[in-house]
Image (cartoon, helix red, strand yellow):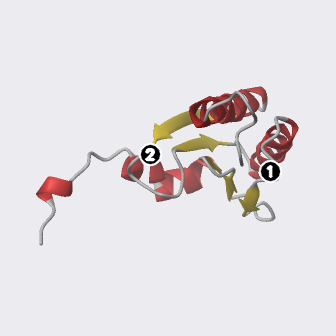
Amino acid sequence: MPSPAGTSRMDDLSRAIDTVLASLEDSKAENIVSIDIQGKSPLADYMVVASGRSHRHVAAVAEHLLKALKDAGFGNARVEGLSGADWVLIDSGDVIVHVFRPEVREFYNIEKMWQAPDLEEETVH
């Protein structure tokens, strides 16, 4: 999404993260973790992981977030997994959000993978 006149990309990123976190808090999402992945992945700058208590809660959290992003001017985010509501992925461009049921989140444990230290110099060739 292009930045409106007078705002920088970092301002937009900060506003996107604030929108995501506020929506998740408002929806009573649990165990919210924000991970800075700038320089680690070309997919996004931040990843946010959260849990819902049930299929219904995961779906409600995701739908609320989609509306919040649209209302804040970030357009229609891409979404996957909403029909099953075990793991919903919302891609708003700069911020990717994963909303899980707790047992699914524990199984995949994606935040551990993304929070791992950089191993570039220790990579086995």
Percent x, y of residue 33: 53, 35
Report the quarter where the C terminus lies. bottom left
Q: Which residue is mark 2?
A: 37
Query: Is 88 on the left or on the right of 35, as rendered?
Result: right
Between marks 2 and 1 in the image, the one whose residue lies nearer the viewer? 2
Secondary structure at numbered mark 1: helix
Q: Amino acid at mark 2?
A: Ile
**59 w.r.t. 32: above or below:** below
- 62 and 38: which is toward the camera: 38
Q: Residue at x 82, y 35 (%)?
A: 72
Percent x, y of residue 55: 76, 53
Q: In which quarter of the view is residue 88 placed?
A: bottom right
Q: Which residue is mark 1?
A: 59
Query: Is 42 on the left or on the right of 21, as rendered?
Result: left
Percent x, y of residue 7: 68, 29
Q: Residue at x 83, y 47 (%)?
A: 63
User: Tag on residue 48?
Assistant: none
Q: In which quarter of the view is residue 115 placed?
A: top left
Secondary structure at numbered mark 2: loop
Residue neighbourhood size for the residue with mark 1, other residues' Cα within 10 Å, grouped as few (<14), some (14–19), many (≥20)? many
Percent x, y of residue 83: 81, 64
- 16 and 27: which is toward the camera: 16
> Between disc 2 and disc 1, whose residue precedes?
2
Label 2 with label 1: CB-CB less than 8 Å:
no
**11 w.r.t. 69: above or below:** above
Residue neighbourhood size for the residue with mark 2, other residues' Cα within 10 Å, grouped as few (<14), some (14–19), many (≥20)? some
Q: Amino acid at mark 1?
A: Ala
Q: Residue at x 47, y 57 (%)?
A: 42
